[in-house]
Amino acid sequence: MKPLFSVITVTWNAARVIAPTLQSVREQSETDFEYLVIDGASTDDTLRLVREAAIPGTRVFSEPDNGLYDAMNKGIDCAAGRYLIFLNAGDAFADADTLTRLAALAASDPGVIYGQTQLVDSNRRVVGARHLTAPDTLTADSFKRGMLVCHQAFVARRDLASHFDLNYRFSADYDWCIRVLKRSSANAYAGLQPIISFLTDGLTTQHHRASLRERFCIMCRYYGTLPTIARHIGFIPRYVRQCVRNRTNQTSNE
C-alpha cells in the first residue's frame, strides 16, 4: 500500500545541520509516510547520521547531481506517496503532530495542503515568523504578491507535481508552486500554527539578488510584465521593512 506522504530531504555534506531534521521526522506521531534522502554523494558524516537515525520507511539515494532542484526532481521520481513534502536539511517539522494535522486535511483530497513557517536560528531558537504570511485561501494568483508559502510548507499531491524547471538556479521552487496551483482545483490551509521551522541560513546577497531577479522573470511570465512592474513598486515598503528586520535580527545574534 502506498504511503500518504513522501517526505523528501535533499542533502550534500549536511552533517552540520541535518540532526534536527532527522529528529523531527523520527518523532512524528503520524506514521503513514516514507522518508527519502536524496544525497549528492556526500563526503562527510551525513549518510552515517541518516543511518543512525533509523527512521522507519527510509530510502537513501546517494550519487552526484546537478544541484538542489535536480536532486528534488530525483525525489519526485522516486516518491511513492500521495503527497510530496520537501524538507530541506536544517529545516524541521514544527512539532511532533505536524503530519497528523496534515493527514487530517488530506482526507478531503486537496491538490495542495499548506501552512505557516517559523524561522529558527542555528541554535533552534524561534526568531520570528517568515516575512510573507500564508493566506487563508491560496490560488495561483496569490503568488502575484511573491512566494507567500515556502516550498517546505507547500504539500503537493503527487499527480499534480511535474519536475522543477532547471533553467532556474535559485527560484525554481517559485515557478513549481505556481504550476502546481494552476493544476489544483482545491487547496487546504493548515491554520496559523506553523507546520515548518525554517533554518535561517544566511544566504549571500549575491544569491538573494539572483533569486529575486529570477522571481521577477517568473512573475512576468505568468502575470504579465507591466502588472509585475507596477506590483514591484508597491513592494518597496515591504522590502525596506524586511531589510530593517534582518539587520535587527543580525545585531541581536552578534
Image (cartoon, grey):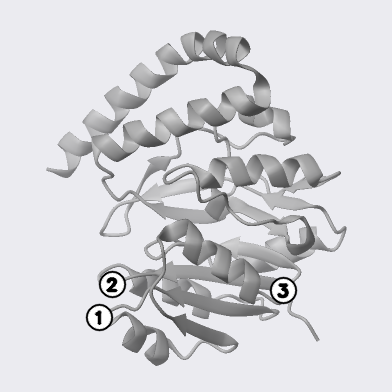
Q: Examine the rendered structure and indicate whether residue 147 appears above or below residue 118.
A: above
Task: Name the amino acid type tagged 3.
Answer: Gly
Disc 3 to disc 1, C-alpha distance? 29 Å
* Residue 39 image offset from top left, x and y in percent: 41, 75
Task: Look at mark 3 in the image and give the residue it sits on.
Answer: 81
Which residue is the extreme one toward the left? 254
Rendered location of residue 181, percent (x, y): 73, 42
Quarter of the figure with the C terminus: top left
The residue at the point 79 percent across, 52 percent down is: 111
Mark 3 or 1, which is nearer the eye?
1
**What is the number of the mark on residue 43?**
1
Q: Secondary structure at mark 3?
A: loop
Residue at (50% x, 45% y) in the render:
167
> Label 2: few (<14), some or many (≥20) within 10 Å?
some
Marks 2/3 in contact by CB < 8 Å: the verdict is no
Pointer 1 local density, CA inside 10 Å: few below 14, some 14–19, many at least 20 = few
Disc 1 marks a residue whose amino acid type is Thr
Q: Which residue is mark 2?
A: 13
Q: Is residue 97 left or right of residue 52?
A: right
Is 122 on the left or on the right of 120, as rendered? Answer: left
Label 2 with label 1: CB-CB less than 8 Å: yes
* Amino acid type, callout 2: Asn
Q: Quadrant of the N terminus?
A: bottom right
How far across and how far down the image is residue 69, in percent? 49, 57
Who comes first in sequence, dot 2 or dot 3? 2
Left-right relation of 178 to 109:
left
